[in-house]
Image: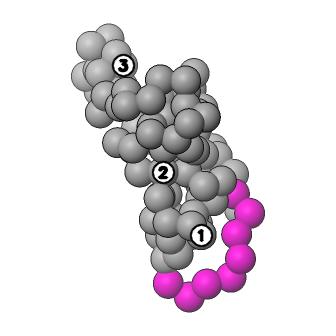
Amino acid sequence: MTVTLRWQDDTLYKKDPDAMASRVVSVGKHEHFSDGFLWVLFFPNDRIKVYASQWMPGFPGFPEGLQTPDSPCPEHFTPLSDDPRCSQPGKRIKL
């Protein structure tokens, strides 16, 4: 399954206020569930992931163990910023 995403960021808006970026992205593997969310996650270096999940980021069942945007280790997105594996503990991702 795929989704077609259209979005605009500040850089694109400065070039052309009407311009939109677009990409077709595969939805990650997921088990059947009757109620949940479609999560679109934008990562550095133009990486985009889409997940169908009954869980929210930060919950044990969320794909790849990803955390909420304000709490992961900046360079990994999986361990929390206070995890000993994080090379920059306490540093937060700027939203």
Task: Check disc 1 and give the amino acid type.
Answer: Gly
What residue sits 34% from the left and 16% below the top? 11
**Residue 78 in view (yes/no):** yes
Disc 3: which residue: 12
| Magenta stretch: dominant secondary structure | loop
Residue 33 colored magenta?
Answer: yes
What residue sits 45% from the left and 37% below the top? 81
Q: Which residue of the protein is positioned furthest toward the bottom in this rendering?
A: 34
Task: Check disc 2 and give the amino acid type.
Answer: Gln
Say whether marks 3 and 1 touch (CB < 8 Å).
no
Q: How many marks?
A: 3
Residue 47 vertical position relative to residue 24 in the rendered view, above or below: above
Q: Secondary structure at mark 3?
A: helix
Disc 2: which residue: 67
Give 48 or 3, whichever is nearer the viewer. 48
Disc 1: which residue: 61
| Quadrant holding the C terminus | top left
Q: Residue 65: percent from the left, percent from the top?
A: 60, 55
Q: Residue 61: percent from the left, percent from the top?
A: 59, 69
Q: Which residue of the protein is positioned furthest toward the front in this rendering?
A: 84
Q: Residue 43: percent from the left, percent from the top?
A: 52, 33
Residue 18 vertical position relative to residue 70 in the rendered view, above or below: above
Label 2 crowding class (10 Å Cα cut-off): few <14, some 14-19, many 20+? many
Q: Secondary structure at mark 2?
A: loop
Residue segment shown in magenta: 28-35
| Quadrant holding the N terminus | bottom right
